Amino acid sequence: LALCGGVGGAKLALGLYRVLGENALTVLVNTGDDFEHLSLHVSPDIDTVLYTLAGLADRERGWGREAESWNCMETLRLLQAEDWFLLGDKDLGVHIERTHRLRQGEALSDIVRDFADRLSISAQILPMSDDPVRTLVETDEGLLAFQEYFVRRRCEPAVRGIRYQGADSARPPERILAALADGSFDAVVICPSNPVLSIDPMLRIAGLREALAATPSPVVAVSPLVGGRALKGPAAKILRELGQEPSAKTIAAHYGELLDGLVLDAADARDCPGVAVPTLSTKTVMTSLEDREDLALSCVSFARSLAERGGTEQRRRRPG
């Protein structure tokens, strides 16, 4: 099981997908970033994972579809309509069909499963919930919807807090809770996604954090930081603004009782003694497909070693 946000998490999810083989990977994806734009339901992280695993992602931009065209956006600009959130023509087809089917009463998880099948993806890709959860960012300029903060304001306002609207009443997929309870997953990998913006929306959903803390499967996280910096996105900036040092130690403490181990970049190896769980120091910067596969193999091997030496039992005995 991989817990995943957008671009950074999808890179590792692709590595896991390639090294594990057919039907061996389940990806639980953040939907706190979902929003309605131009009357369309947009699911940025879900689509990033779909495009990445299907081999359709734009590798140069790091988001969206490859060989994209932008005729719709050009028309919106001509009409002086909202054009701050870029939607390519191929991408729009996905949003239109998803929105139509949601309005017909179909569950988001069923739509995502059908999209994955049509894109010939053998992994199970699941939204974190069929119930709406929306990430809201408390800033020094007021409360902002996630995409307003992340895209329109380019993460510029200082962050004072995060809200996960709807998380208390949302439910995670029952199949995930059942598989965690009976130890069906060989490992749970928390991908190097932003812990506050991409992973916490999942962990705030009723029952999921508790299920992860109790599972007999080994749970490892990959730090999204290298040398105290995020390679992409505002993770380090947000941690500092929330009064926390951007470090591997902070990432481990953030996930707390969930973890059996932490994977961190070799550049942060000196931080290993300060981390409260076993660590693996390796290359976590994924610039090539080989990098993604190597990191995936390292995560799987590390998780297996933790299970063999009883690390999961130690985690379940730790106080929450």
Image (cartoon, rainbow, N blue to C red):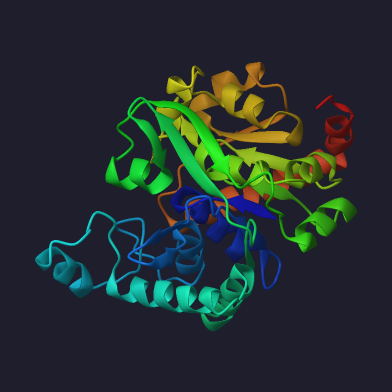
Q: Disc count in the image? A: 0
Q: Is 218 on the left or on the right of 5, as rendered?
A: right
Q: Give the x, y percent position of residue 13.
A: 56, 57
Q: Is residue 283 visible?
A: no
Picture quadrant of residue 128: bottom right
Q: Give the x, y percent position of residue 178.
A: 84, 58
Picture quadrant of residue 132: bottom right
Q: Give the x, y percent position of residue 266.
A: 52, 31
Rendered-image quadrant of the N terminus:
bottom right
- Position of residue 68 relative to residue 310, above or below, is below
Q: Is 254 on the left or on the right of 261, as rendered?
A: left
Q: Is 94 on the left or on the right of 212, as rendered?
A: left
Q: Residue at x 71, y 34 (%)?
A: 261
Q: Is residue 266 visible?
A: yes
- Position of residue 227 relative to residue 285, above or below, is above
Q: Residue at x 60, y 76 (%)?
A: 105
**Extreme-bottom residue of the structure:** 118
Rendered-image quadrant of the C terminus:
top right
Q: Give the x, y percent position of residue 189.
A: 67, 47
Picture quadrant of residue 281: top right
Q: Residue at x 53, y 83 (%)?
A: 118
- Position of residue 67 relative to residue 278, above or below, is below
- Position of residue 126 relative to residue 31, above or below, is below
Q: Is 26 on the left or on the right of 102, as rendered?
A: right
